[in-house]
Amino acid sequence: MRFRTFLGVLLAVVAALAVSYISNLNTDLLADRFAVTPTASVSLATALLIAFLVGFLPTVAALLTQTLRKDLAGRRARRIEREAKSMEHSFRRAIDYQSDGLWGKASAELEGLLGERPEDFSVLLHYGEVLRSQGRADEALEVHRRASVLYPRSVALLYELADDYSARGETEVADQIRERILRDFPGQGLRCLRRKRNEFLSLFDWREAMRTQEKIEALVGDSGDASEGEKEAAVRIGLTYQQAITLLEEERTEEAQELLDTILAQEPRFVPALILKGEVERVREEPDAAVSVWRRGFEITGSPVFLLRIEDHFIEGEQPLEAISTLHALRDVGESDLLPRFFLGRLYYRLEMHDEAQKVLEGLSDALEGSPSFHYLLGRVRQRRGDTQLAMVSYRECIQKSGNAAGEFVCRACSHHTGDWSDRCEACGSWNSVELDFAEETFSADELGVRLAPAQVVYDRHWQPNGS
């Protein structure tokens, strides 16, 4: 019991006792008649009781009414809160279904919500997006049109309307809407600009992509979002790299070299720029300088791409001994010698020095036991040496480890697999993101001594490669 309630009960008891005591002292007085009219009278006690009730009952009635109103309002508020929580949970489920690509379930949840909240902005926005993802572009357009009438100044709805028209094949109308966003909402056209930039990227139009990128960076700079600024700076590095390639194709070697130096000053572990810098040295007929750049690249990054390039360079130049000595020297570079030793064994195999290849590779058996590529290469070497039984053992190990006889490269941005290394992922367009698939090889980058640099990612969910 609360103290205030206890105090009230105590005072009531004290008052009742006091009234009883005083009544006993004034029994004769209370029994006297009190004239109500000239012909009617009541006892004084009855008159006092009536007067008390007349004054007390309205107050009690008002208090009871107020209490009942508060109770009813509280119940109503709790019911509304429960309904709101239920709808919030339903909306969250719909968003989860949408994120997982379960469009049918997401659509069912959002339809139910629309029955309860037909003018809710978020529900209308997501319901139209789900309908479009289901291939129901006409219905999506109708939903977003209805929402735009309710919320005529919403940029998000304009974006969705543009996507609806694009899904219907009405690209001209979609472009007009995006142009309107850039014109009427100059500070909120970031998504349109990114889409336009990505379209230029898919067409390999690097100059227009860079012009658009400058506008994007201006908007991001105005917003003051540091994380977005870092992302856009990374994309600029990729575009600058493409400019360097264009300059090389135009035989403007010195300008290309300056751009590459600019890139490497910002991101020293940008593998494509290091590879291209070495190629520039080759164009300038400085092969030793090219090898020096690639060796330094391997020392900085630990990336096996440099070992591949060094190996190919010497094989193309018919200098196998230089290739062997360079890989021998790189064994002492970096935190791990696994990759240089593996590539040395691979080089011996390419040079048909099978005894040396087997010696090197068998020395890696414990360290690379979980690698399917290692077992495949060792099997090839053993087969060439005529050790058929041992070769079969290696092939069996390769199949058991992954069922894949060839090592693959993977994009760290979108997980696209490819058989060869490239400076830019062909699936998502990101630069500096293609590396050996360490997960498939069951080794981490750290275990192999590879220091991965940030990938220059340009992919987003509103743009697909090749303009699809």
Image (cartoon, rainbow, N blue to C red):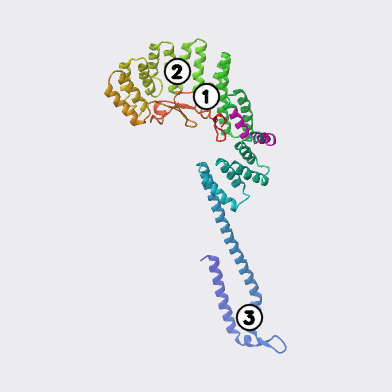
**Can you tell which of label 2 and label 3 is closer to the viewer?**
2
Whether 184 is among the magenta residues is yes
Question: How dense is the environment of label 3, judged by Cα within 10 Å: few (below 14), some, or many (20 and up)?
Answer: few
Label 3 residue SS? helix
**Residue 315, image x, y percentages:** 41, 13
Residue at the image position 38 percent from the left and 13 percent from the top:
325
Q: Which residues are magenta?
A: 175-199
Q: Position of residue 44 (x, y in %)?
A: 65, 84
Disc number for residue 309: 2
Mark 2 neighbour class, 10 Å CA radius: few under 14, some 14 to 19, many 20 or more: some
Indicate whether 356 appears above or below 18: above
Question: Where is 147 relative to 64, above or below?
Answer: above
> How many neighbours does mark 1 have within 10 angstroms: few (below 14), some (14-19), or many (20 or more)?
some
Q: Which residue is mark 3?
A: 49
**Left or right: 345 with respect to 411?**
left
**The one of 11 and 94 positioned closer to us in this rendering:** 94
Whether residue 363 is visible to the viewer of this picture, yes or no, is no
Q: Are marks 2 and 3 in contact (CB under 8 Å)?
A: no
Res 252 visible: yes
- Disc 3 marks a residue whose amino acid type is Leu
The secondary structure that most of the magenta stretch takes on is: helix
Residue type at the position of mark 1: Glu
Name the quadrant of the C terminus. top right
User: What whole-number distance in Å separates the C-alpha atoms at marks 1 and 3?
Assistant: 95 Å
Residue at 54% over, 67% down: 5
Q: Nearer the viewer, mark 1 or mark 3?
A: 1
Residue holding disc 1: 267
Q: Which mark is residue 160?
A: none
Residue 312 falls left or right of residue 50: left
Counting residues from the start of the chain, the first of labels 1 and 2 encountered is 1
User: How far, Cα to Cα, is label 1 from label 2?
Assistant: 20 Å
Residue 43, quarter of the rendered image: bottom right
